């Protein structure tokens, strides 16, 4: 309620500006803030949600601005026609840039986008026939809407409405399956891929929508100024976009609004120090990162919020609902293979890393509906084998089939969509999301729905169904009391349980668990034992990598033992336990 009240007050203040002043300077500043909000709302999706930093968005801003200027001066199009065309052009160029630039990440992505911005800036100067060269394009007609002229006070409301629309669309996106998927990719790429999410496609989508917002801002800027020139689209402009989002708060809805207000209005108050603007921006950037890691809005939220309520401890033991009726919809709806028939078949698998033979001549068959354990000393090649099976590594030779289909060479996300899910030796959670939202990412998987529906807030029925499925799964997993707790605050044992629940939500028919008992106390191991048994009764196939021999012997139907990358024993648990080669591998020989 407090947040809604603050937004209502902000809207009222913004709407009242033309009513209380006719000063064109103040109106121009207000519209500049609005245009910055439009651009940086999209930038917030890119940097705040998906974690990608671009320093070339001034180039996209320029494309939108020049497109609108050319459409208005040469084709005589009004604002209503020029705006969607400018957005479409900028989004298309942004998508092409993303397809190339997002092959890299981190500082390399920043360098690629800087190069793009520099290329655009120089093209604006050199392509005189199209852009007017260094002098730019003048005499852009005054904006009109439905044939009605829009003087500055009226155009102010158009820009304010565009800023409000940008914030509204961003809010819808943040609360959608797309928004959670963006955050998941930022939090852990490998975990996102293990749930069937295509990280490259998601990052491309985030970059494209941010480009579209930049194009919209550029079009609004052209009609506001009446002219465009290359001086408005330099690297300094890209840095300003980044600084607005960092200062306001990365990934926070109000961040672009607060950042734009401060960084547009403050320089106007310090005009006598205009020559030191870059020093000011740099100092503010460093200060924001050091003293306000969550931005100004995040700092206020941290002060305003009451201390978080401690979550009630979940009930002891594992609920008895781990059965088909209690399983998540995605898991229940995927037809289980016939019990006992080969589900995962590995033949003659080899891989070496720098001359070290990690996996050599490995054959492994996992029957449907069973718990098959993979054990061996440290460095035996167990995790390497799982990485090969799930597509995170490529074998040098060999065959891997899942449910009768070869999966060699498939991307991890594609393998996950076929029903082969995994957990990790070190739990890979999406720590910015709550426990419930983590499971919602798993339940949705790659089925994110329409991006347009996410932006406009449609698909509420699907979102409600997704929420119900994830909530039911949390209750089934004994994590219902932790639903609203950030995943990063979960105790270690529950982090592993959340990983399992999230993978089940993705509709897995086979689950590969990489040392799920590591670091657990005896009571938690007993709960894991019961959980694995109930999952097997529900028809799930499990490949278990584990050092806890008592757990392995208790839950396994068959056990395969690796040592130095080779299979040294396989069979029933009680037989493998007495095998001399296994005893020697674990204990050594006299």
Image (tube, rainbow, N blue to C red):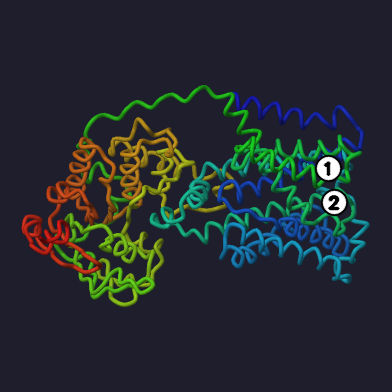
Write down the residue under mark 2.
223
Q: Residue furthest top?
A: 306
Disc 2, SS: helix
* x, y percent for residue 392: 39, 64
Q: Residue furthest bottom?
A: 397
* CB under 8 Å between discs 2 and 1: yes
Q: Residue at x 26, y 57 (%)?
A: 378
Report crowding for label 1: few under 14, some 14 to 19, many 20 or more residues within 10 A (C-alpha).
many
* x, y percent for residue 342: 18, 66
Can the viewer see residue 228?
yes
Q: Residue at x 15, y 67 (%)?
A: 568
Instruction: Identify which residue, 511 or 92, lies in the foreground.
Output: 511
Write down the residue under mark 1.
155
Disc 1, SS: helix
Q: Residue furthest front?
A: 590
Which of the marked residues, 2 or 1, is nearer the chain's N terminus? Answer: 1
- In this rendering, would 221 be left or right of 190? right
Q: Residue at x 86, y 66 (%)?
A: 125
């Amino acid at each position: 309620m407090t947040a809604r009240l603050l937004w209502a007050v902000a809207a009222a203040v913004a709407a009242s500006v033309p009513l209380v002043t006719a000063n064109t300077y103040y109106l121009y500043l207000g519209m500049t803030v609005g245009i910055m909000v439009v651009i940086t709302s999209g930038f917030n999706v890119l940097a705040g949600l998906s974690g990608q930093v671009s320093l070339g968005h001034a180039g996209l801003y320029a494309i939108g601005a020049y497109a609108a200027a050319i459409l208005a001066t040469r084709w005589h199009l009004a604002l209503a026609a020029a705006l969607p065309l400018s957005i479409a052009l900028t989004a298309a160029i942004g998508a092409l840039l993303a397809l190339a630039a997002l092959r890299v990440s981190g500082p390399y992505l920043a360098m690629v986008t800087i190069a793009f911005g520099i290329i655009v800036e120089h093209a604006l100067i050199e392509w005189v026939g199209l852009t007017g060269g260094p002098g730019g394009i003048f005499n852009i007609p005054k904006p009109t809407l439905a044939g009605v002229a829009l003087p500055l006070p009226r155009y102010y409301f158009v820009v304010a409405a565009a800023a409000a629309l940008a914030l509204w669309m961003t809010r819808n996106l943040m609360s959608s399956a797309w928004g959670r998927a963006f955050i998941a990719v930022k939090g852990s790429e490998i975990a996102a891929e293990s749930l069937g999410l295509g990280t490259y496609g998601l990052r491309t989508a985030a970059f494209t929508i941010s480009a579209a917002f930049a194009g919209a801002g550029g079009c609004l800027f052209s009609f506001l100024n009446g002219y465009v020139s290359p001086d408005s689209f330099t690297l300094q402009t890209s840095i300003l976009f980044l600084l607005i989002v960092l200062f306001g708060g990365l990934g926070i809805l109000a961040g672009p609004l607060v950042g734009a207000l401060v960084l547009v209005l403050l320089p106007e108050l310090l005009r006598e120090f205009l020559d030191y603007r870059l020093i000011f921006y740099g100092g503010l950037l460093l200060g924001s990162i050091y003293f306000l890691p969550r931005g100004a809005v995040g700092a206020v939220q941290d002060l305003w919020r009451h201390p978080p309520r401690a979550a009630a401890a979940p009930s002891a033991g594992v609920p008895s609902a781990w059965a088909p009726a209690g399983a998540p919809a995605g898991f229940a709806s995927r037809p289980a293979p016939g019990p006992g028939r080969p589900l995962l078949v590995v033949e003659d698998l080899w891989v070496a890393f720098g001359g070290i033979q990690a996996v050599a001549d490995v054959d492994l068959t996992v029957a449907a509906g069973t718990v098959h354990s993979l054990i061996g000393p440290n460095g035996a090649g167990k995790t390497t084998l799982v990485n090969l099976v799930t597509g995170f590594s490529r074998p040098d030779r060999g065959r891997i089939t899942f449910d009768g289909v070869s999966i060699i060479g498939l991307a991890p996300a594609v393998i996950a969509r076929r029903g082969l899910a995994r957990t990790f030796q070190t739990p890979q959670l999406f720590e910015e999301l709550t426990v419930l939202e983590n499971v919602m990412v798993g339940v949705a998987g790659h089925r994110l729905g329409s991006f347009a529906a996410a932006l406009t807030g449609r698909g509420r029925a699907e979102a409600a169904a997704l929420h119900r499925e994830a909530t039911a799964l949390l209750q089934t997993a004994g994590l219902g009391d932790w639903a609203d707790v950030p995943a990063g605050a979960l105790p270690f044992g529950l982090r592993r349980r959340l990983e399992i629940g999230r993978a089940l939500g993705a509709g897995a028919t086979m689950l590969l668990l990489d040392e799920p008992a590591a670091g657990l106390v005896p009571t938690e191991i007993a709960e894991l034992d019961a959980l694995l048994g109930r999952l097997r009764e529900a028809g799930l196939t499990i490949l278990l990598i584990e050092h806890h021999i008592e757990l392995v012997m208790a839950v396994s139907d068959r056990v395969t033992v690796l040592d130095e990358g080779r299979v040294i024993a396989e069979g029933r648990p009680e037989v493998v336990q007495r095998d001399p080669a296994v005893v020697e591998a674990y204990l050594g020989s006299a």
